[in-house]
Image: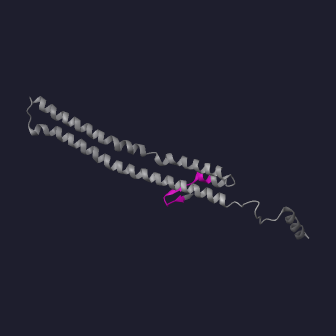
Amino acid sequence: MLRLSGTMRLGGNYATSCRKHDAPRRELRDIVQEAAQLEVPKLERFLPVLATIAFLTPLLGLLGTVAGMIDAFGTIASSGGYATVTELSGGVYKSLLTTAAGLVVATPTFVAYSYLSSRVNTMMHDMERAGIEIVHMLTESRPISGIISFQQPDETVREIEARQDL
């Protein structure tokens, strides 16, 4: 298993590229890119939930604010246009409480979403870099044919084997 930055493990799919080390460079690159694309959904699977919570809770807080203000004005209307502070305070309290609750939930959720989203982007860049390094390692270790060969031609190998048999 290959580790990136001490935190991320890359296995299975990248191992395929190592097993097919004799494949052309383009095919190796495609295998590595496909492996990275298969990992991205795993990394991003809960980010939409966090984004939904972060963006929805302030709206729910606003809805509570409106409900609290409706309650306060309902109190004024039911008392003939005159209401005491005590009678109004229940609606205002509800309105402030729901606004605060929405912000208390939304703020850390949005911070968590931003942090995790940046971590996913960092990991994706690390995977791309690792994939490029894997392809380079596999293709650069191949001998360049036709320039210099350190292996003896077949006839010479046969002659050496024949001499050793004598």
Describe the colour scheme in one phrase: one colour
Q: In this view, does 14 lie to the left or right of 115?
A: right
User: Relative to residue 79, is residue 95 depicted above or below?
Assistant: below
- The image shows residue 135 at horizontal and vertical percentages of 62, 56
Q: How many marks?
A: 0
Q: In this view, does 62 lie to the left or right of 150?
A: left
- The image shows residue 121 at horizontal and vertical percentages of 46, 52
Whether residue 11 is in magenta: the answer is yes
Q: Residue at x 9, y 30 (%)?
A: 81
Q: Give the image quarter of residue 63.
A: top left
Q: In this view, does 152 lie to the left or right of 5?
A: right
Q: Residue at x 18, y 34 (%)?
A: 71
User: Relative to residue 89, is residue 110 depicted above or below?
Assistant: below
User: Relative to residue 147, is residue 26 depicted above or below?
Assistant: above
Extreme residue in the right direction: 166
Whether residue 114 is in magenta: the answer is no
Q: Which residue is drawn at 17% across and 40% down?
A: 92
Q: Which residue is drawn at 49% across and 47% down?
A: 42
What is the span of residues highlighted in magenta in the rendered image? 3-15
- The image shows residue 10 at horizontal and vertical percentages of 55, 55
Q: Which of 128 and 38 is in front in this view?
A: 128
Q: Quadrant for the N terminus, please.
A: bottom right
Extreme residue in the front direction: 147
Q: Give the image quarter of residue 164.
A: bottom right
User: Relative to residue 144, is residue 67 depicted above or below?
Assistant: above
- The image shows residue 134 at horizontal and vertical percentages of 60, 57
Q: Quadrant for the C terminus, please.
A: bottom right
